[in-house]
Image: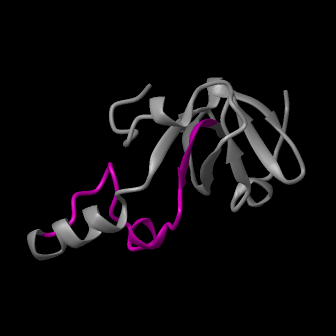
Amino acid sequence: MNRLRAGALLGLRIVDCNGKDAGSVQDIVVRHSGGAYTVLGLVAGRSALAGRFGFGDSLEAPTPWRHLLGWLRRHERYVRWEDVVAVEEDRVEIAVERRALPRGWRGRP
């Protein structure tokens, strides 16, 4: 079992299979089961300001704020943990192109 501190991932640059920048790790999507946390994926982007408000794919924002928070999250992409090839000291390498990354993680297993 590999153990990795979440704090070691946050802020790292994400590099796609072509060596192009895909943003940085803004958040980590996990599942809690049986007393353990399993990483499902990473939220890549430029900023996590909207996510810090607590609104994301699992919590819908109130109507007056929905468009603003959606606009703030427009650059976010989801990286499945299975697509992570390597976690280096200064970057996370992924096996897919940045253009192929989906926008949200809602409904992902």
Q: Quadrant of the N terminus?
A: top right
| Residue at horizontal 34 percent and vertical 57 percent from the top | 74
| Residue at horizontal 66 percent and vertical 35 percent from the top | 16
Which color scheme does this rendered protein use? Answer: one colour
| Residue at horizontal 17 percent and vertical 67 percent from the top | 67
Horizontal and vertical percent position of residue 78:
48, 40
Q: Is 9 on the left-hand or right-hand side of 71?
A: right
Horizontal and vertical percent position of residue 27:
57, 56
| Residue at horizontal 85 percent and vertical 54 percent from the top | 90
Q: Is 109 on the left-hand or right-hand side of 93?
A: left
| Residue sitting farthest toward the left | 63
Looking at the image, residue 62 lies above or below residue 5: below
Horizontal and vertical percent position of residue 99:
47, 34
Judge by depth and name the residue closer to the eye, 67 or 20.
Answer: 20
- Quarter of the figure with residue 38: top right
**Tally of marks:** 0
Judge by depth and name the residue closer to the eye, 94 or 4.
Answer: 94
Residue 44 on the magenta span = yes
Q: Quadrant of the C terminus?
A: top left
Q: Which residues are magenta?
A: 39-62
Looking at the image, residue 57 lies above or below residue 70: above
Q: Is 7 on the left-hand or right-hand side of 99?
A: right
Q: Is 5 on the left-hand or right-hand side of 97?
A: right
- Quarter of the figure with residue 51: bottom left
Horizontal and vertical percent position of residue 26:
58, 59
Residue 45 on the magenta span = yes
